Amino acid sequence: MKLPKIPDCCLCLSLAALALWPSLSQAALYISIVQGLGGQPQYDEQFNDIRKKIETASATVTDADKVFSFSGDHATRAALLKHFTDLGKKMTANDRAAIYLVGHGSFDGDTYKFNIPGPDLTAQDIKGILEHFPGRNHFIVNTSSTSGAMLETLVGKGDKASNPAFVVISATRNGNERNATQFGRYFAEALHNKDADLNKNNSISIQEAFDYAEKQVNAHFQDEGKLSTEHAMLRGDGAAQFNLARLNAAEQQAELASATGQLAQLLKKRKDLDAEIEDLQVKRSQLNNADYLKRFQQLILQSAELSEQIDAAQKPDTGKKSAPAAGGTSVP
Amino acid sequence: MCLEQRQLRGLGSLAVATLALAVSAGSALAREPLYGVLTDAALLKCEDQFWHGRLTDARNCYQLLQTSKTPIAIRAEASWALGDLQDANSLFQQAVKAEPDNALLRIRWGELYLQTYQYNEADMLFDEALGIDSKNPWAKIGSAEALSKGGGDPKVINKLMEDVVDNELTPAGVRYRGLLMLLHNALGKDKFDEAAKAIEEARSVAESGKLPQLELYALEAANAFMTFKPYQSYIDTALKQDPAYGDAWAIPGRFAMMTRRYRESGEFYEKAVEIQPDHWQAHLELGQNFMRLNQINAGVEHIHTSFDGDKFNPTTINLMRMLDVFLNQTEVFSFPNPPDGPFPKLELRLNKSESTVMKDYVRELAQAGMATYQQRYRFTPKEPVVIEVYPNHEDFVVRSVGMPGVGLLGVTFGYLLAMDSPTAHARAESYHWGTTLWHELAHVYTVEASNHLVPRWYSEGISVFEEWRTGPIPGRKIPLDVYKAMAEGKFLPVEKLDDGFMRPAYENQVIVSYMQGGLVIDFINTEYGFEKIVDMLELFGKGVKLPEAIQQTLGVSVELFNKQFKQFIDIEYGKLLKNLPGWQEDRKAAFAALEKEDWKGAVDAAKKAVSSFPDYVEADSAYIALARGYSKLEDKDNEFRTLETFWQKGGYASRALLALARDYGERGDSEHEFKVLKDVVWADPFAQDLHIRLGNLYLSHNDPARALREYLVLLSLNPPDKADANYKVATAYKALNDNDKTLQYLMTALEVAPQYRPAQSLLLELSRSTGKQ
């Protein structure tokens, strides 16, 4: 394993978490996780837990040397600015960056600060980091209290808000929501929870993680019998297409690695078919509706048959019922 | 407020169109006679013609006053009488500018604002007049009326009224007007002795001051009507003086409406608008009355007529807005359909946005209630029972009382009841729609079975009693404040219990009165038997008053009855009331400990609270704190038992019940899981998990039709997991052998989630089965 070269202080992920899922395209995804100061043991523990969950999830969607994690004394403003500057230089316009800020924030009515050892990271710092990255479609989530103030710095306030070139999530609506937030832990939980996977594709997109976390935050406050003190915000386009985690990455990797012969062929075929379905859905607006539906049904049926054949191939002893050959089924 | 800023206003977004129309229509709003406030001979001549019904002569007379030779203030009066209110306003403004120290000008200007429902502005002008002439009785009576209509401080109003009415030196006209106001007030509160005195005194003052007595006759008619005496002669006398005096009918009509005698009220109002077609207030109240009697088209027509004539009335504006929603967004369902008799037994009016969710549940509960009440109260409805459910609370209260901002949950007008939907309340935990429906439905039977003559408290008491005895969540549910009132001896003797509803003397007395009513009925049921409750109801329907009804039915005097009831309360709640402070402390301590994440402390305190008051199961019940404490301590078994007890005692907090249903499910107890889920339906039918669980249960018990209903409801709630919701609908259709529908919903599920394996598998199964066919 190669240690990432950029920040000396950066803590690399464990071997077990490395490279479980290969990148599917040429564009690289760089993920930076910053854990701020907890201030109290309960928050230190909570932020540690969140950071670890994000690290594990991140390892399922990009290479290990593209995941950077900062916490404790390593998460200083100087170190972070250097990291992001170097990262910006390294990235191409096709690459994407994802930034997680996990911790507490403060807002004095003028300036938002993410609380880290030494000088804090300000909203202007964060804006500079994002603007410095080449290309578009980057992502930042700030789970801290008052993080809505950062959002306002990034995209503007009220009527003056603009649609950013990146996806940004804040745990609070504005800088006045000052209580320690619940959003972060549910967002991290979403990255590992199949309940968050609404399109059942075993990947968790930004949108899915946000929807899950938002729902859980509401439920949390209802359970506690309190009015919600935080209201998360999501701005920017493409949140549904930006995946942050794969749910069964290890299993799929193992499946691919162990598959031989017919099973390997079937798995590859299904992967290709899934890609074809996705492609068809993207092009839906360009097609006649009837043509689209007909083709979609055909592909779905093929995918279903393949899945059945894969199941049968994986369980030779129990899968007594053999699947019919492709084309042997019809849609009423 | 400076003079230049004063403008008569229409209301809301309709105001722009309003003013022009009001002027051009030349409409005359209801005015009062001058009662001597002005002495201009030319004006008085016109007034005399107007109040004797010679309307054409009066109009010509007023028009002759609209010349530059006439004093500005008199021209203002003439414009006002002719219905040109903007011109009247402008002329008063000029007059006041010319004579800033003339209190009378400001008083009359204030009266113009009173007539246009602008009570704050009116009161400011009366105040300014009092600043010029601090003892002016016309300013005081005007201020009293403005404050009274605008919700002012009763103490201030009373002081102003006393200054006018109790002062023998006050001019007859203003004192007379004060007495008429007191008479309205007394009749509105069923204080007929006070009303009789006020009538006598007003007559004496009117006769000695030679004042017009039209309104007094109308009020006498109302008094006679309300006390079941002949009233026609009073109306005839008024109409003899002024054949076009619509209030001769409208005033009794208003009091008939206030005492819920809607049919008679409608008849009065119809006669009012017949003789005075420009009585816009009567059109409005007739329209509202028709709406209450379920004659929607006629109601809408009169409300529109009222609006066309008087665009200043806030009630009309509110109703117009409500009607816009009501007429365009309501979906109507009748059962049975087609009817099995001359009319359908039940009609539902639901907002289109939630009819998919509510329709079947409202029908199921309403039909169960109707069957229960028909049998228990020996009464078969003679018309369809109509239930309207409003997702917007303000629409509901405007439909019910004409004005927003009233804290009602449901209202019954004879056979028609209107109520809030669960979606009208932000927190489902605090509103149980099923109980509201059950409560209101009982009124249909008690009110109709007694020809609308049941005392208010008795009808409310039966409704509360039925909530506890036969409702969706049986068991006495009494709010904390009521226990405090009970401990402080604030319950009223039954013969005065209506005062608690209609003239509350302290905060929360209305809710205390509801609960006392329920407990009184419960007491009769326990001590004398249920049939006596119905016997008494029937006596009320024959016009028998409460003391006689108690004597005839129960064989005791009302005094003895009150003593017995007090003993009943002492036995039922004496011990609890002594423990109440300690229980309160423990309950609060339990929630405080939860706040501090002291789970064990929460459990200890909650256990003590539950032990001293095990029947308290409201949303802030100690059971909730106890279950949450156990949950945090990961003591699943005790959490389950706590929630189970909470539910068995009638607890209805939907999240707690859903957790209990899940526990029952995990324990394989589908029978109890189902019962708990059905209870959640009556509390929070918009909970998505509820429909998933119910649908799954129905499907697993081979009832795909009901499963389909639950899944379709789920889908209508726009769940986050649309793939799974569509798949669930498909599974139900598959079980019903509807392959086309199965495929339709499957493909929708797979559009959202192409790799969703269960949906893929079902697609394969469907494909193969149809391939075989």
Image (tube, coloured by chain):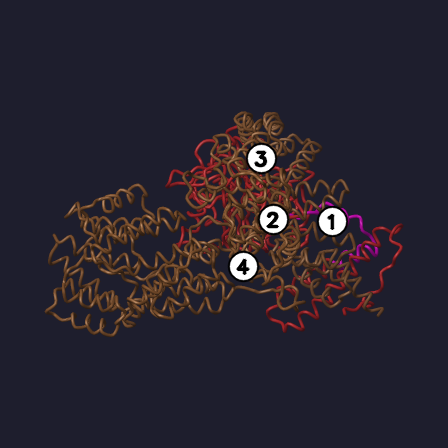
Chain colours: A red, B brown
CA gap, disc 3 to disc 1? Answer: 49 Å
Type of amino acid at the residue the image marks with label 2: Val
Q: Which residue in the structure is indicated by mark 4?
A: B416
Q: Secondary structure at mark 4?
A: strand
Between circles 4 and 3, the one closer to the viewer is 4
Q: Are marks 2 and 3 on the same chain?
A: yes
Does the image show residue A237?
Answer: no
Type of amino acid at the residue the image marks with label 1: Gln
Between circles 3 and 1, the one closer to the viewer is 3
Q: Which mark is residue B534?
A: 2
Q: Which mark is residue B554?
A: none
> Could you tell me which chain the residue with mark 1 belongs to?
A
Q: Are marks 1 and 2 on the same chain?
A: no
CA gap, disc 4 to disc 1? Answer: 62 Å
Q: Which residue in the structure is indicated by mark 1?
A: A252
Between circles 2 and 3, the one closer to the viewer is 2
CA gap, disc 2 to disc 3? Answer: 34 Å
How packed mark 1 is, by other alpha carbons closer than 10 Å (few <14, some 14-19, many 20 or more), is some
Q: Nearer the viewer, residue A43 or A215?
A: A215
Type of amino acid at the residue the image marks with label 4: Leu
Residue stretch in magenta:
A243-270
> Could you tell me which chain the residue with mark 4 belongs to?
B
Q: Which mark is residue B621?
A: 3
In which quadrant of the rendered view does residue B304 lie?
Answer: bottom left
Q: Secondary structure at mark 1?
A: helix
Image position, residue B231 (x, y; %): 39, 60
Image position, residue B464 (x, y; %): 57, 45
